[in-house]
Image (cartoon, rainbow, N blue to C red):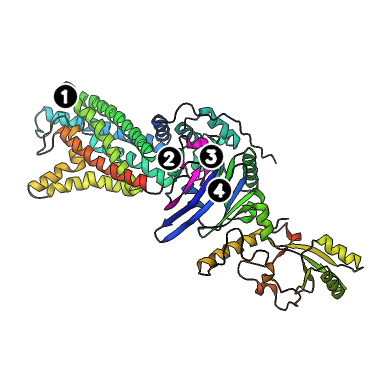
Amino acid sequence: MIVARGLTKKYGDKTAVDHVDFAVPAGTVTGFLGPNGAGKSTTMRMILGLDRPTSGTVTVNGRQYAGLSAPLREVGALLDAKAMHGGRTAYNHLLWMAASNRLPRRRVDEVIDMVGLREVARKPARGFSLGMGQRLGIAAALLGDPGVLMFDEPVNGLDPEGILWIRTLMKQLAAEGRTVFVSSHLMSEMAVTADHLVVIGRGRILADTDMRSFIDQNSTNYVRVRSPQQDRLETVLREFGWEVAALPDGALRVDGPDTARVGDAAGQAGLWLHELTLVQSSLEEAFMRLTAESVEYHAGVPGVHTPAHPPHDGDGEEAAPAPGQPAQVPQETQAPPGWGPPRRAGDAGRGQGDVR
Amino acid sequence: MTTEVLLPEGDAQPEGRIGFGAFLNAEWIKIRTVRSTFWTLVALAVVSIGLTVLFCALSANSIANGSERDTHPDELISVGVVFGQVAALVLGVLVMSSEYATGMIRATLTAMPRRTTVLIAKALVLAAMLFVIGTIVAFLGYFAGNAFLDAKDIGVPLSQDGVVRALIGNGLYLAVLGLFGFALALLMRHTAGAITVGLGMIFVIGSLVGLLPGKWGDWVAKLMPGNAGSQVTVAHQYHGDQLGPWTGFGVFCAEIAVLLILGWMRFTRKDA
């Protein structure tokens, strides 16, 4: 359990982390999401006592990090894979860490096997690839069998196998009841790994919510339907009380029902359908919208921001033609910055951000 | 694709209480598992012993036949330390600056967040290593160099006043000199910068202040770290107005202590 209260870090005039409150619960993977420079790494360094907060506190298992008597037993951290002397072997790097917390020497061999570095354990770390360095960093984090684990951008630069390995590892660690706190600037990565989400932008917490409700709140879904009997279909669909709008290419946009209900409605009316698609906005777009708002907020728009409840929540129409009005302007030019055109669910294979 | 991870439970229980001893052990493993330590110490030994032997061998004849009256046998038996001190200073700098250069400092402080304790452990391991190596090197240099002097019947016996003190003094001087580099690295967090300043203080400024006029200038010269500290490394003081061996070493220790305290303040108060 990691708890931050009013955590603030200023570097001169620049505020990197601004009165941040959050709690990272045990037993789940908590994603720490934000664009580069949002304050993720600074926050993690403060958790580990590497950087001193300007004000506020952050505790691990109820105590400040510096007060932990055997820190590696309680917290394992992968901040960056290069936090080691390139001339020292992987084995010796883990050996001094084990010695510092009086962990048994055999534990070094165990974690080396765990991360699959047995063959290179006696070689200097400077010759390691990024993926091997990352594995060594994870071995160091697991050394003390800690209940709290933190990973800062763990999948950066890894190949697909390495990414899958880390995802699986994090989920397994959480399933064992541990606290897992993982940062990323990629929503798509968080969507497949994290159960809980803390979103940070410009040093402020923009959302602190479980992944399911973040997706529900931030993804705008609608049904795209095309029929040779477009006018009749539109009338039929309106009779159900759904919002129907014409899309630029002539198809209809239906907000509210899922594809099954739209198809059933058309079938009952005896109408032909040429297309019936569920269109989802990607989480990446929802995330960009959130952080774009944090930019707006800092530019001085008052009172537009409430954490966990974005002001445009459930208001996706802003980016699309108003219901019932024919769209005349191409979608691209209508979309405000950071809120691009929705992608089709059928494209999920290409767009990683699409989540069903 | 198998991505199974096995996490044996309860296998990472700490053995005993984690205190200063664990930190010392960790820092000891760290210092002996990088090659720079090994090579710096090899350089220290080779240069110190080699030069002591060389000076003794080359001067033995001329001293014995009286053609070189300004050189005394008991100054030669530990003369190599003048050059060995470069290695000690570099090692002291590297022990700390490499932590910042490599990013190791973050691993160090996550494993050992008690900063004052980790700093003391680090300094102690460094100083102890340099004292032991420095003293052994000084004795080896003495035995090897003195053999050449003995051959000409101008040998300096260990029993002669000041000889053993000078040889042990070499170890002490190198240990504190290493701490000098360590403190500079703490303050500057930069390898080349700290080495440059350290060598400049000992070799350049230490000599240049001798040119300062009057009594005031003499005192400044006497109190310079290298000048004050190295008095303990010679068996007999022949050259002019200097502090006594132990007085000089005490002044040196006090000066380095001030630097260490400044470094400690920076280390414990600033972000890593």
Most extreme residue toward the left is B214
Q: Nearer the viewer, mark 4 or mark 1?
A: 4
Q: Nearer the viewer, mark 1 or mark 3?
A: 3
Label for residue A23? 4
Most extreme residue toward the right is A270
Query: Residue at the spot x=85%, y=63% of the render?
Result: A263
Q: CA distance from mark 1 to mark 3?
A: 57 Å
The magenta span reads A54-82
Q: Amino acid at mark 4?
A: Ala
Q: CA distance from mark 4 to mark 1?
A: 72 Å
The spot of residue A178 in percent (x, y) is 59, 39
The spot of residue A243 in percent (x, y) is 77, 70
Q: Nearer the viewer, mark 4 or mark 2?
A: 4
Q: CA distance from mark 2 to mark 1?
A: 50 Å
- Give a yes or no on whether discs 4 and 1 share a subunit: no
| Pointer 4 or 3: first along the chain | 4
The spot of residue A346 in percent (x, y) is 76, 60
Q: Nearer the viewer, mark 4 or mark 3?
A: 4
How many numbered discs? Answer: 4
Q: Amino acid at mark 3?
A: Ala
Q: Which residue is mark 3?
A: A141
Q: Which residue is mark 1?
A: B156
Tag 4 near tag 2, CB within 8 Å: no
- Residue B104 located left or right of residue A247: left
User: Numbered disc 2: what chain?
Assistant: B
Q: CA distance from mark 3 to mark 2?
A: 15 Å
- Give a yes or no on whether discs 2 and 1 share a subunit: yes
